[in-house]
Amino acid sequence: MNTGSTAEMIDPQSTAAGIAADAVSTEDVETIIRRRDGWIPIDWNELWHFRELLYFLVWRDLKVRYKQTLLGVAWAVLQPVFNMVILTVIFGHLVKLDSDGFPYAVFVYAGLLPWTFFSASVTLAGQSLVHQQNLMTKVYFPRLFVPTASVGASLVDLAISFVIYALILAGYRIVPGWQIIFLPALIFLTVLATLGISYILAAITVSYRDFRFLIPFMLQLMMYASPVIYSVHIFPQRYRWVLALNPMLGIIDGYRSAILGKPWNLTSLGISSAVATALFVYGIYYFRTTERGFADVA
Amino acid sequence: MSRPIITVDNLSKSYRLGEKRDPGRTFQEALTEGIASPWRRVRSMARGQALAPPPDRTFWALKGVSFEIQRGEVMGIIGKNGAGKSTLFKILSRITEPTSGCARLRGRVASLLEVGTGFHPELTGRENVYLNGAILGMKRAEIARKFDEIVSFAVVEKFLDTPVKFYSSGMYVRLAFAVAAHLDPEILIVDEVLAVGDGEFQKKCLGRMKQVSRGEGRTVLFVSHSLATVQSLCDRSLLLRSGEVAAIGPTYDVLAEYQSEPEIRTLSEISTATRRGEGAAKIVAGRLTDAQGATTSFLRCGDDVRIAIEYRSAKTNRLRGCRLSIAFADLLGHELFICSSELTNPELTMLPPAGELTCCIRRLPLTPGRYQLNLYLECDGAVQDDLEHAAEIEVVDGDFYGTGRNCPPGWEGRGVLSDYRWELSQ
């Protein structure tokens, strides 16, 4: 159903009652199409109306991804585990990095969880609009769903990885403390930051195709600026607040605090959370502003 | 009389020419430009705007289009290529935004630009039905409810669980159309998606379209090139010309207006086509006129038609043993009938070295549809010019038999009507 995006929707609650319905109910759903300049607020009604489509897009991405891979669902599991093993060997045993007093494998996996989610989402989302061009020039649906579906698919992978992590923790006989109740909030923050950056990159890549090549490079830089492999403590205290402008810094450190019971770094976490929220808001704004041109540029 | 279900008010759409943001534009280039006027560029990029183009480089795809459609009407949108039909379609389907003006749609809208939108080759038929249905706007419950109907319409029961990449193109199209055919909106906007599949399937699609529009009383906006289909489905039509509304009203009248469009030439220049022959004499141009002599771009079945063919040769004396013929064929190339000059006009076997011959056909005996013309010129004992597919013409509904009916279902585009009557033998 096509109902207002550059439009206002009045009472979207009309059901599929068919033509036999009286004139009153059909006249309730009115779509007004006109040009809108500048900032277009999100039509939450419309997003809710199309919610099933988001589910289908995520479902499609997952199904297709797993039909095409040899390893199937195992890939979601294998990637962070594999990384963990390699990094543990190199940085845990050979280089012997400080891992805040925890076994390195456990320590690094706590960082790999959110990081893998973030980098996979951003990479997929960046290309998502460009790949869906065919769809976007033929049918109307909230374009915001396209990068969101990429992030959604990675969220499923994240869930699977968490299960694996539980097994690993059990193997090391580590039981998370009460701080684990903060984990959902951290995941929420991670998703915010990821969505924000994904929206921006997805929209930019439509106009500037070479961003596709910049993204892996940016991600690599960002990984070194985040406490994935090493502890956040290697960064000197007084510069940490600048580094916390990288949202993943505070957030990844937060994961370790919530799951492993490391002391919290509230300043970093606070700054990173603020940046994550700002990115999310700006991401939506940027996306909505450029959205109207997607079908034209395609 | 309630308010119109669709109101379009002064809708316009312009595109930038030349400096259009082209997909090859790189961030690098933007950066370099940015250095030239840094702050402005950064600000506009951060706001997601592109700088405005010089005003004389705009192309207006639609200009001041206004019309109203009442509930239950089936409105055809016609016009030649580039007139703005697809742009209007895209704006009303919210795929692209208008530059100015406004449109109001009172009711749930579904639009079909192509069948199989969103079909993914790796997914099975069953999965794609759900995916496609969701993309077109159906809810999951609705798709589940209609699933069996969709599958039996498409006749693909046995292949539901095979990935669609293994489907034949016919199956693919049938399944895609089946999903689209079961949409349940109040307003349906369709860009011609019926020109797909084989004859049998086209019949089914047409039938379904008729049922949806007349039977179920939905409002349909039908954008099409096929005048014959527009005529059979649409009560009213709108003619777009260079982005503006040239005519709106009962289909019959609008078609008449379309007919007189000077730019439409189906036969005027015989340029390429598959051309064989000695070449000593050549057919150079052709013209279609109705009985009154007015140039037309399409013919009405049952009407008197005149086709003028102009030929030239390098010779100075008269040509002997001449034959000029026009064969009417369907779009697959099967010739249906021929009008050959020597059969009816033996005096025309001698012709001046250059001139124009007109073939006058009374009561054009073709069913509505598109046909191609094969032209043939022979003289001085040899084939001089043999043009296959010299032109395509469109035949619309007329009145060959005087009964108002002239085409059995399934015979569009391939039937020759002959004079006959039936009698009951006692």
Image (spheres, coloured by chain):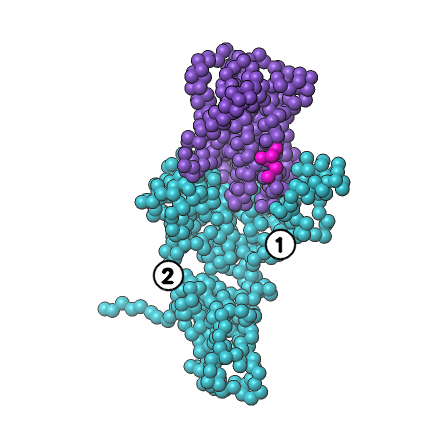
| Residue under the point 38% across and 47% down | B166
The amino acid marked with disc number 2 is Pro
Judged left or right of residue B335, residue B28 is right
What is the x, y in percent for residue A37? 66, 38
Q: Is residue A286 left or right of residue B400?
A: right
Horizontal arrangement in the rendering, residue B26 relative to residue B184 (left or right): right
Whole-percent x, y for residue B42 in the image: 71, 36
Which span of residues is magenta-colored?
A213-218
Choose between A51 and B253: the one closer to the eye. Answer: A51
Q: CA distance from mark 1 to mark 2?
A: 36 Å
Q: Amino acid at mark 1?
A: Glu
The mark that comes first in sequence, 1 or 2, is 1
Do the numbered discs 1 and 2 sit on residues whose CB atoms are within 8 Å?
Answer: no
Residue at the spot of label 2: B408
Farthest residue in the top direction? Answer: A178
Q: Which chain is purple?
A: A
Instruction: Provide residue B423's location: percent of width, then percent of height.
Output: 29, 69
- Above or below — where is B157 with respect to B254? above
Q: Residue at x 54, y 13 (%)?
A: A101
Chain B appears what colour?
cyan
The numbered disc on residue B227 is: none
In the image, is residue B120 part of the stretch drawn in magenta?
A: no
Which chain is home to disc 2?
B
Q: Which mark is residue B244?
A: 1
Q: Helix, strand or loop at disc 1?
A: strand
